[in-house]
Image (cartoon, rainbow, N blue to C red):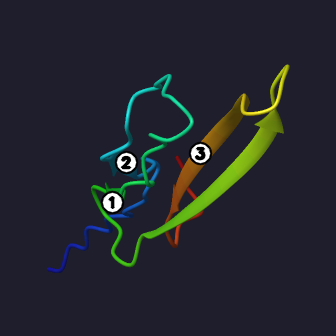
Amino acid sequence: TTAVQTISVIDTQAPTLTGVPVDATVECDNVPQPPVVTASDNCAMGIVVDYNQSYTPGNCDGNYTLARTWTASEGCNTTT
């Protein structure tokens, strides 16, 4: 007699980012450099973390907003 069990493994969990800083308000001469942000996942290897920064001018010279975005993606098309 023979019995077969088939197990299908799927990755539905998005990667988790580590090291993303909290929002901050700083003086113009004290803008921090973007940190190195990493990601981990329960299944995937080869996770890629992409970084993007956008600039929005403020209400006067020297005032502006930087929006820093980190996106982690892996081979199963789940992103965070």
Residue type (three-letter) at the residue carrying disc 3: Arg
- Write down the residue under mark 1: 38
Residue type (three-letter) at the residue carrying disc 2: Leu
- Write down the residue under mark 3: 68
Tag 3 and tag 2, C-beta contact below 8 Å: no
Q: CA separation, marks 1 and 3?
A: 14 Å
Mark toward the viewer: 1 or 3: 3
Tag 2 and tag 1, C-beta contact below 8 Å: yes
Residue 61 place in picture, x, y as percent:
81, 31
10 in relation to 56, above or below: below
Asked where in the image residue 45 lies, by quadrant, the reply is bottom left
Residue 19 place in picture, x, y as percent:
30, 46
- Write down the residue under mark 2: 17
- 4 on left or right of 46: left
Q: Residue at x 38, y 42 (%)?
A: 20
Precedes in sequence: disc 2 or disc 1: 2
Image quarter where the N terminus lies is bottom left
Q: Give the secondary structure at mark 3.
A: strand
63 in relation to 80, above or below: above
Q: Nearer the viewer, residue 2 or 48?
A: 48
Number of numbered tags placed on the structure image: 3
Q: Residue at x 84, y 23 (%)?
A: 60
Precedes in sequence: disc 1 or disc 3: 1
Q: Nearer the viewer, residue 1 or 27?
A: 27
